[in-house]
Amino acid sequence: MKIGFLGFGEVASNISKWLKDSGLEIYTSLENRSQRTQDLVEKSGVNICENNKSLANISDILISALTPDEAINVAREIGKYSKGVYVDINNISPETAQKALEYIENGRTADAAIMGGIKKEGKKVQIIASGSHAEQFSQLNQYGMNIKVTSPHLGQSKALKMLRSAYTKGVSALIFESLYSAYKLDLDEELLECLKITEGPDFMKSALSRVISSAYHARRRAEEMDEVLSFISNYNDPIMSKATMECFKNISKTVNQDIMAENYKDVFKSHK
Amino acid sequence: MKIGFLGFGEVASNISKWLKDSGLEIYTSLENRSQRTQDLVEKSGVNICENNKSLANISDILISALTPDEAINVAREIGKYSKGVYVDINNISPETAQKALEYIENGRTADAAIMGGIKKEGKKVQIIASGSHAEQFSQLNQYGMNIKVTSPHLGQSKALKMLRSAYTKGVSALIFESLYSAYKLDLDEELLECLKITEGPDFMKSALSRVISSAYHARRRAEEMDEVLSFISNYNDPIMSKATMECFKNISKTVNQDIMAENYKDVFKSHK
């Protein structure tokens, strides 16, 4: 079985490594790829096709793992050449995934979403898949992946990812804001200590990791929340999600982020 | 050692039971108490003083556990009669506690805050104490309580409680909002299942318990958040806490609450 990757960033390079180690043939193409990606491909030792079209033509499963703004364009470009199952694992909304997958002429499609940190959790990270050909994609579980098919309806896995983001990013914003107030009152350590008691054994580690990564990635989080918001607003008035986006915007603009990142890096090390 | 309780609601009746079972003499008074409280007192078998003044006069440790709006008035009333250590464990802001404790003429005071659910956690529930006489209050640890002295500065324990509330009530609002959107998309069970994987082993139980109690107590939560907000606003721009209050207000006004309470009660039972 030949597995192709459109794009070769963090997601593709990790998944391709797991699958290659399990004995599968991995392919990608360097068409329109950055120097950084070309280096990643070279290091990984995967097979290189001449271009995206020939990659689409030979892949039994073709996984689209691009930057969000490329997802539709690349699907349009290779839509009539895709011979196998085309899986969109891009970090995009259900609507955008739907649009992209409409270009795949053979109709053998699935959308997928990664529910956690691919670097941190490795091949155990859960991947949710939906769409008419999600079951075929989940055959990669035989090669060590952790794919769960949630529905034959296209877009459900992206929807689930958005809902999950609304919660997890919201918790990050909350712990950042609460801890920043506590920091100003010189009660930050006490706050963490007393939350630890009721919020479970993993609280301390995950809270500190959330504060630090919120500090470093506030701008990107705000952008991601913007997409989450425009999706959820179709179903609910997302008061907390609006605040989450505002909070990350605010963090990215103010000096808080440096204070928080530096302040809790050491605390974090001692709780690792 | 004689322990007195001003007020005899849930907090006083629980703590007095632990201390009575450990052999301490417990006192209260029925002055201005409701019929419900009088019944609670009778059932508890604690000693009854003629009025608040005589209670203040004989208590080695006098614990004020009233409704928030009584805290200042009762302190003013018995301020010059309090002979022992006066501990304010009311659910009030640091500023209000400060005002109340200024009436205690002997100056032997502490403020305390309960960090968790007294009914659910029992005598293991952590109580944080601060103020000049917090150490004396913490002697009750010899009788099975779990009091942690955090600072000799009056008001710190109430401040910590407010910060903790900002976080825990925020998480409740977040899980409610996320789950309600998921419910509308028929993805609520899937959302809980996939959060369970990354949010720790206690996630499911605590999320469901938070959703149900948010549904039932939305109005009270909104009121409590109002007080949290007015405290935190002195130190930070509490974007997430404002949203938490709005979210609870919204829940208390709309039909969501019944859907959510009913819907997850059964799910909750199966995860207990």
Image (cartoon, coloured by chain):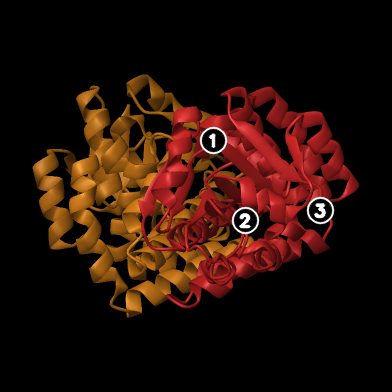
Chain colours: A orange, B red
Q: Does dot 3 land on a helix, a strand or a loop?
A: loop
Pointer 2 and pointer 3 on the same chain: yes
Q: Categorize mark 3 by other alpha carbons within 10 Å: few (<14), some (14-19), many (20+).
A: some
Q: Categorize mark 2 by other alpha carbons within 10 Å: few (<14), some (14-19), many (20+).
A: many
Q: CA distance from mark 2 to mark 3?
A: 18 Å
> What percent of the width, then of the height, locates residue A103?
51, 56
Q: Is residue A37 visible?
A: yes
Q: Nearer the viewer, mark 1 or mark 2?
A: 1
| Residue tagged 1 | B1
> What percent of the width, then of the height, locates residue B100?
59, 67
Which residue sits at x=41%, y=28%?
A: A146
Residue at the far top: name it.
Answer: A142
| Residue tagged 2 | B90
Amino acid on which the number 2 mark rests in the picture: Asn
Q: Is residue B243 visible?
A: no
Q: CA distance from mark 1 to mark 2?
A: 22 Å
Amino acid on which the number 1 mark rests in the picture: Met
Q: Chain of mark 3?
A: B
Amino acid on which the number 3 mark rests in the picture: Glu
Is residue A237 placed above or below B52 in the rendered structure? below
- Given residues A135 and B188, the one toward you in this image is B188
Which residue sits at x=83%, y=48%?
A: B258
- Given residues B68 and B134, the one toward you in this image is B134
| Residue tagged 3 | B31
On the rendered structure, is B103 left or right of B164? right
Determine contact: label 1, label 3, CB under 8 Å. no
N-terminal-most mark, 1 or 3: 1
Q: Quadrant of the C terminus of chain B?
A: top right
